[in-house]
Amino acid sequence: MTAGTARTVIGASRERPCTLVVCRGCCCGNPRKHPGSDHEWQLDRLYSAASDSEGRFTVRTTDCLGPCDQANVIVVQPSGEGRRRGGRATWIGWAMDDAATDDVLRWAADGGPGIAEPPPTSELQFIRPPGEVRRRTGRRGRARR
Ligand code: FES
C-alpha cells in the first residue's frame, strides 16, 4: 500500500468474522429440484458449526443469488482481517454433499479468504459471481419474457 492510500477500518467491519452466506432461494436447498441431498441437514450442520466456532465464523441464509444451475451456492465472505489481507468473497457452487460442506466449514474455521488457503476440492467448485460474468461477457443475463 502506498502513502495516501491506507484505509482505516472502523467499527464492526474491523471485527467482522468470516461469514458463510448460504443460498436458500428457488433452487438451492430445494428438495423438489435437488432430491438427492438433505438440505436441512446441511443447514443444521452449518449453523451448528458456526455456533461451536465461538464467533470465528457465522452463517446466514439469503434468497436466490443468481446462478441457480450451480446450486447449492455458498458465498464465503472474508472476515475483517481477511479482507485487510486481500481476501475477497468467494462463491462456491454445487455444494450439496457432506464432503463439500466439510470443506467449506474447514476453510471458515481456519479463517476463510485472506487468512487460510481454501481446500483444493473447494477450489474446483469456485464459480464466478453473476456480476463478474456479465462484465466479462458483456451480456446482461437472461432475457426477460
Ligand atoms: S436459488 Fe441459489 S442461486 Fe438461485
Image: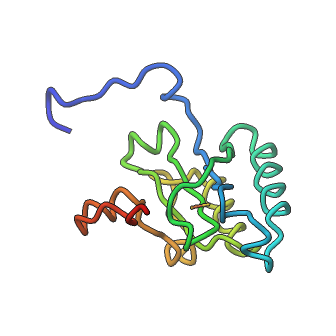
Q: From the image, which quarter does the N terminus lie in?
A: top left
Horizontal placement of 105 versus 2: left or right? Answer: right
Residue lying at the far left of the rendered structure: 3
Taking the spot 49% from the left edge, 19% from the top edge, the residue there is 11
Tell me where residue 39 appears, x and y as whole percent.
79, 65
Taking the spot 63% from the left edge, 55% from the top edge, the residue there is 23
Q: Judge by depth and name the residue closer to the eye, 128 or 58.
A: 128
Query: Ligand 1 lies in which image quarter?
Result: bottom right
Depicted 142 relative to depicted 1: above or below:
below
Residue lying at the far top of the rendered structure: 11
Taking the spot 66% from the left edge, 65% from the top edge, the residue there is 27
Taking the spot 78% from the left edge, 52% from the top edge, the residue there is 49
The quadrant holding residue 51 is: top right
Task: Report the number of numbered marks.
Answer: 0
Tell me where residue 129 appears, x and y as whole percent.
42, 60
Depicted 37 relative to depicted 39: above or below:
below
Tell me where residue 96 appears, x and y as whole percent.
70, 72
